[in-house]
Structures are given as C-alpha cells and as structure tokens.
Amino acid sequence: MSQRPRPNVFDPRRRLLVVAVVLGACGFAIAARAAWLQLLNPEFYQQQGDARFVRDVPITASRGAILDRNGETLAASSPVSSVWANPQETLKHPERLGELADALGVGRDELKQRLAARADREFVYLRRHMNPDAAAQVVAMGVPGVHEQREFRRFYPHGEVMAHVLGFTNIDDRGQEGLELAFDPWLTGKPGAKRVIRNRQGQIIDDVDLLRAAEPGRDLVLSIDRRVQYLAYRELKAALIQHRAYSGSVVVLDIPTGEVIAMVNQPSYNPNARAGGPGAARRNRAVTDLVEPGSVIKAFTVAAAMENGADPTRRIDTSPGVFPLHGHAIRDVRNFGLVDMTVLLQKSSNIASTKLALEMDDAHFHDVLTRFGLAQSTASGFPGEAAGTLEPAAGWGDIEKATISYGYGISVTPLQIAQAYAALANGGRLLPPTFVRGGNAAAPEGRQVIDPQIARSVVGMLESVVAPGGTATTAAVAGYRVAGKSGTTRRSVAGGYERRYISLFAGIVPVEQPRFAMVVAVHDPAAGQFYGGAVAAPVFHGVMDGALRLMDVPPDNVEAWLAGAAPAAPAEIGTDGLVPLDPATPGPTAPAADAGVQP
Amino acid sequence: MSLRAFLLLMLLGLAATSAVAVVLARHAHREAFIELTRLEKARDELNIEFGRLQIEQATWSETNRIEQIASTKLGMKFPEGAEVVVVTP
C-alpha cells in the first residue's frame, strides 16, 4: 500500500466549502430579504395586512327634524333596521334559506333569486326598513352571513296636510321633493368615519381611531303654522267636496314678514307611504301650477292707473255693457253705467279696466305688473317653482293690453298673487315669500314697488268688494275689516278656453294693520256654482276666522261686532266680471287673446 | 464607571422608558376611545328616543285627531254668533 496520495483522491473539504458557501448565501439572502421587508421597506405587507383587517366604517348621521314656527315636529327621522347578507356565505347554507325567508316576510323563491343574482358580491339587502325588533330576531337566528344595519326612516305625523310643502325623502333619507329637497344639504349632516379592526366574520373587534366625527343634520324651523295649515286644509277640502271641484290651492302669507303661514293643495297624498299615489297629487300646485288671474289682477290695473295720475273718483262710462275693440266685444256681466275705480273693483267691470288700460303706456303697465312680482319667479327657493308668462310689452297690441287688464293672457302662480296682495297691504313694500321662520329678517324692509299712498287707497277700494254689494261678501270675517278681490277664469287649454272654470279669491285682513294675505284657487268646480265669490271666498272666510283667533290678531272692527252686525248675508253672488259662455258655443272656444272677448 | 458608559446606560434607560410610555399612552388612547364610543352611542340612543317621542307626541296632538275627539267624545263645539259675548271695558 503506497502512502503516496493519489492525485484524484476525494477531498471533502472543498465540497464542504461549496456547501457552506451556498448555504451561507441562502441564509444571507433570507436574512437580507427579512431585513428588507422588516426594516427597509415594510409598507407593502403592512398595507396588505391592514387591507384584510382594518376597515373604515361610516358613522351614520341622523337627518335633522323639520319643525313648524312654534317648534312642533312636522318631520323627523327614526331608526329602522335593514337586514343584509353576504351571499357568498349565506348561499353555502341553502337549507336555511327557507326559514330566513319566512322570518323576513319575503317569498322563498324571491330571496333565493336575489341572493343568486349577486352570488359574486359580498353585500345584498334582504329587506330594508324593518322594525328594529323584528330585524334583531332575524339576525338572532344565526344564519351565516346575515347582518343588520341601522338606517333612518322619515316620519310625517301630519301626513296629507303638510305633504306638498315638506315633500318627502327617498329610501336613503335624501330629500326628493319640496322643502326636504330644497334644504337637503342643511338637513342631511355629514356622516363620520371611524377605523376599526374586523375579524374574519366581519365582527368589529377593536376600535382603532376616529377619523371624522359625524355631524348630525340641523333642524329646520319653518314659517308654517301647523294649526292654520290644518284649518286651510280642512276648509279647502270641504269646499272641493261641496263644489265637486278637481283641485285647489290655498296660500296664507304673513304680511309684515313675507313668511308663508300655510300652503295647502288638493288632491294630496300620504308622504309616509313611499308609493305616494299619482304624480298629479304630489305637485305643490300653489307654486308649480299657473293660472290666469282673471279679475284678481284688476287691483294692479287700478294701481298702475293711479300711478299714472288717474283720478280714482273719475267716473268711467261702461254703458251699455259691451265695448267694441278692434272687432272684438269686451263685455261686462250687465250694464254698470258710470263707475269710479272703487265700483270697478266692487262690481269687477271688464270694460272699465280695459278703458283704464288703454290710457296707459304699454311699458308702464308691464312694469307695474312685474314690479309686483307677477309672472316672475318669487325666489322662494321651492323646487319646481313656475315663473309664469307675460309677453314683453313690445309685443302687445290693444287687445292684449285689454285682456291683461282683466287677467287673461298672463299666467301666474297662486303664490305670486299672494305675494302681490301682501305687497299692496304692506304699504307697497314687496317681501319675497319665504318658508323659513325669520327668512326675511336680513332685509325686513323689502322692496318699495309702489307709492304707499296708492297702495293704501287700492286696499281701501278692495274693502268694498267684501262689503255688501261687492262680489265676495262671503269672505267677510266678524270683527275684522277685510279687503279682497274675487276672480273667475276659464281654464285655458291648447288653442283656447274650456267651459271649465278656476275660482279665485285674494284677500287681506285686517285692513287697519294688515296681517294675512291669502289666496284661494279652486279648479273646475262642477256642482253648478263657479264664481270666485261663491266658491273661493267662503274658504277665505273659514280659514281667516280661525287663523285670526289662533294668531291673536286684535280685531279692528269691534264697533260693528258690538253692534251685533253679523256680516250681511250675501244678497247676490258676485260675478267677477266673467262673462258666461253663450250656451250655444261648443267646448273650447276663442283663441287665447280673445279670452272673455266675443267676436 | 466611565462617563461614556454612564451616558450610554442612561440613554438606554430613557429609550426603554419612552417605549413603555408609548405603549401606555396608546393603551390609554384606546381605552378613552372606547369610552367615547360608548358615550356617543348612549347619546345617539337618547337622541333617537327623543326623536321617537317627538313623532309620537306630534301624532297624538295631530289637529284632526284632537278635533275629532273634541267634537265626538267630549261633545265640544265652536261658539257661534249669539254665544259669543263681547266684553266692553
């Protein structure tokens, strides 16, 4: 055996060295990677971990309540529970779907379909807005993936009475109509957010941090008075039933502040039922629907004439009750003979208004009407408010001017009429109507639209309309001096006017220190009577009789009351200058410009 | 003990104290936050209860209902004409 080492003998040290180097390199690589992840660049896996456990969850903010001017609740949100499921978990237990459907009160097939349709999602509502106790029972059944979530539902304790003014919210508690929509940002509040750690089942195991505190919505105090609103609703509804009318509106404004005290419409709907009835019942007609004001506008025709320097005591000849104008005949109900401006208003003479209008400059008459806010948006901020239509003075001819002077060829909303009458009663100062208590506090003077002297004398003349011999004696209120003007117009349809009527009344009370301006509009009374003095004026009487007492307005006519002089029973129902259609005339008749004018 | 070793030890001690303080502060924050959440929840519950009571009150005091009860159950009516006496000073 030779001891001489063979050149090709196996040397373990080299192999060991290679192994050590390779292993060492692996170890170093692992350590380096660990250091890289832990020390130098830890964000990525930190984020991945957080993404699996840390959640930012919203904190719901409740919607503010709506209160009336005396702090009574008109709308408030109350919590309800919505049950939701994670379909991926729930669908793994099909054997429990049946009992779940029964507990929820939905059809078994419907539930299955709803889950299956969203099988790849992690969230589906099973039933929204449940009674919280019932929802708690459903969740207590322990079906995997079923959870509840708190939501808010809006309640309107006054239902139909307030429906149009308030509007309503959708299922997510956002305003959809009316003041709920107009003041949505104010009422909504800002939902907050907090950061939590959740486990695999979605349960919150730790609150980590508050990201944003929830800001609850603010309360909204309206100018509406709940009691007057109810009174107006009741009286209007009674009048509509009595006269078999199709629809109607009432607006009551507080004259010194321009605040809306009451605004009701018929037909109405129940805002607590989300289906809500037909769309026609949901319109706030007092703001969104246009009417031709008819004789109600004559107060402003007279005001414009007086601003022009016309003498209110001058007598205008209206004989023989028909006045030809460019081949058209303008008619009064009967021959009133010589009338001054007071009698013009009291008897509602179309001919006298026409003659006053013809003396006026087109631009000036147009200017007076727009100054009173007629056919102008009122800036009340109510969603869907209509502006109305009034052709620019440049496009007027004599016929147009004449028809406008007695209220055709111009369309306005009942709210605009109320605003204009309130301005007359407020010494010629126009305040934009507001639905918020103190809404005009920033500018309580309003805008002077006509000389206070003229405004006062027009109101004085309007008092004769309600006095015996006027067209609206039914509007009188015991103990108070009332001024007003009735109107009756034919409803305009495409291409002419129907044999259907709108009965109007606009009134101011008490005359001494005007407090309320109220407008009543009743569409399509079908029970025989249709004159404003017979249909709309009694509503004014009914509402104001109660409202003046409720709002503690001192009587300004105590002497008459003391003397026991109950308001005189109407001797004749006034006719508002509306000339009834010739019975032989069929359906829709003359073109628009010929309203109340017969060839 | 050299000055250097002393400083080193002191810094080590301070670092350890600060570490514990951070843990304690973090813990206190968690506890305070849990308390805050609890109180806010209680406040919300009370607010919600208040809202519910307001709705209930408004429902009971609904004018139509009061009128119905006054006229049918209690037999009340509004005074008319001759029933009103005007008191003169």
Image: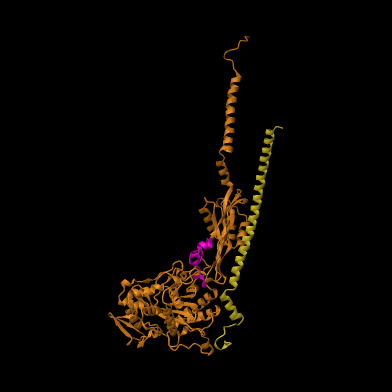
Please state, as top left, top right, bottom left or bottom right, where the N terminus of chain A lies in the image: top right
Q: Position of residue A250 (x, y in %)?
A: 47, 76
State which quadrant residue A333 falls in.
Answer: bottom left
**Left or right of residue A279, residue A329 in this image:** left
Location of residue A313 with respect to A10 vertically, above or below:
below
State which quadrant residue A96 falls in.
Answer: bottom right
Visible in this render: residue A182? yes
Q: Position of residue A516 (x, y in %)?
A: 49, 77
**Left or right of residue A351, residue A539 in this image:** right
- Give the chain letter for yellow: B
Name the residue nearer the viewer: B6 or A216: B6
- Colour theme: by chain
Question: What is the residue that sits farthest to the right in this orientation?
Answer: B1
Is A169 within the magenta?
yes
Q: Position of residue B74 (x, y in %)?
A: 62, 81
Question: What is the residue that sits farthest to the left in this orientation?
Answer: A327
Visible in this render: residue A528? no
Question: What is the residue that sits farthest to the top in this orientation?
Answer: A2
Location of residue A22 with respect to A42 vertically, above or below:
above
Q: What are the residue bounds of the magenta stretch?
A: A160-188
Q: Position of residue A183 (x, y in %)?
A: 50, 64
Is A414 within the magenta?
no
Please state, as top left, top right, bottom left or bottom right, where the C terminus of chain A lies in the image: bottom left
Name the residue nearer the viewer: A491 or A593: A593
**Left or right of residue A269, residue A359 in this image:** left
- Give the chain letter for orange: A
